Structure formats: structure tokens, C-alpha cells
Amino acid sequence: MLCLLISLVGLSACRNPIDTSALNSLAKSDVDMIADTSLREMNMLMEELLVKLYKRNPHELDKVNGMSIGQRQNQIFDTPGRLVYKELQQLQGTAALDLAFDPGYKGDRVFALMAGLVGMVRCAYNWQSEQFMFDSLDGQSLFNSARNIEVLAARLSNARGADGKRLLLSNSQQGEKEDLSYERTFGKMIAIQDMMAFAVVGKWERGFNSVIKNVVFLPMGM
């Protein structure tokens, strides 16, 4: 396969324009292509979640003067790699998620939650937007991210401040029209990460620690 790739690179140098999509597909295993599709779907679901949370909690957006949903989308999804913000005390991943549920935090909780979630998912995919044949995803990290999304969904539905009010609103409250779309979104994300975890374990024939903690985010090795 390596010789074939080198030959194709040599041939492509003699032609213009170069079709890099063909080379990319040759450098990917089935699991790599599944991972790419999974990450794209995760990004779409997370962007959808960001919009929904801000519409449900508009007061969080108002904590930063002149901020819009579109600006928050750009800050998170147009920034590659690690998501480190002074606004979030430089906290990343699960630490940023914990900040979102800290009763004493005065900043934008939705931003902390989404920056933490997106960073955690990126960590599970080795901070890469694409996977290739010689890359190695970690099944345990993918599995942990799925469990962390379960914890996130539970905390989002139950976390309250000192006044007894929910820190962030998501699913419908008593007296409101039923809305289970948040549960469906989280369910899809959990299923995708679990699927990837088992696909990677099958690829490398290794298992993972299946211990689940219900209230504490599992480590991601960030």
C-alpha cells in the first residue's frame, strides 16, 4: 500500500490539477472513514445543541455585551484544535464542563458547556479533523466521552443554584409544551461515541474499562 501511495503521488505531480480526494481515500481504513463521518455528525449535533441552549437560555448570551449566537458558533466551531479562553479561566474539556455547573460562576454557562463539550470530543478524536491509516484512536477515550455525555445530560437536567432554580434550562418544564429534543440530541451523540469506541476496540483487538461514574466526568487525558 505504501508503494502504491508513493507511485500515485509521483503520477499526480505530473498532472494538474491534483485530485487529493483519491489519495486521501486510499490512506484511510474503514474505521478511519467511519471516524470521519462520526466526527462530522458530532459537530452538527453539537452546533445544533449550542443554538438550542442559547435560545432556551438567552440571559446567558446577555452576560457578554454585544455577543450573538453566531459569534459564539464561530468562536467554537471555527477555531481548530484546543479551545482555550481567558473568559473560561483557561479551562478546557471536562474542567470547562464543571465550570458551567459551578453555582458560583458568573459567566456564560452555555459557552462554558459547549466549549468543554466540543473540546472533550476533539480530544477523543486525537485533536484531528480527519483520521488516516497510521493514526490510532483510543477506544477508552471514546468510551469515556460517551459516558461523560451521559453525565452532562443528567447534570443539565438537574443542576440547581443556591436559589433552587435550574442553572440551565433544557427539556420542558412543568406546564410547558413537552420538548424531548435535548434528550434525542444527547442520545444520538452517546450512540455515535459508543459505536466508535467499539469499532476501534474491534480494530485493535483490545478492551476498555467499563466502569461508569454517574456524577463525575471521566478523565480524557487532555
Image (tube, rainbow, N blue to C red):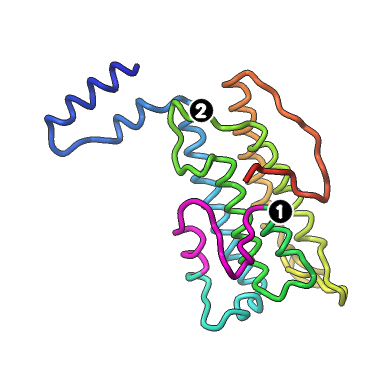
Q: Secondary structure at mark 1?
A: helix
Q: Residue at x 51, y 82 (%)?
A: 66
Residues shaded magenta: 72-93
Q: Secondary structure at mark 2?
A: helix
Q: Residue at x 46, y 58 (%)?
A: 79
Q: Quadrant of residue 138?
A: top right
Could you classify mark 2 by the number of other residues whose Cα lies within 10 Å: few (under 14), some (14-19), or many (20 or more)? Answer: some
Residue annotated with mark 2: 31
Q: Amino acid at mark 2?
A: Val
Q: Amino acid at mark 1?
A: Glu
Q: Residue at x 13, y 37 (%)?
A: 16
Does residue 126 appear left or right of residue 134 in this picture?
Answer: right
Could you classify mark 1 by the number of other residues whose Cα lies within 10 Å: few (under 14), some (14-19), or many (20 or more)? Answer: some
The location of residue 61, given as percent across then percent down, is 60, 76
The location of residue 201, given as percent across then percent down, is 63, 25
The location of residue 211, given as percent across then percent down, is 81, 35
Residues at marks 1 and 2, CA–CA distance in whole angstroms: 27 Å
Residue annotated with mark 1: 183
Which callout, 1 or 2, points at the residue further toward the start of the chain?
Answer: 2
**Does 194 sit above or below residue 167?**
above
Q: Residue at x 35, y 25 (%)?
A: 26
Nearer to us of marks 1 and 2 is 2
Report the disc number at residue 87.
none
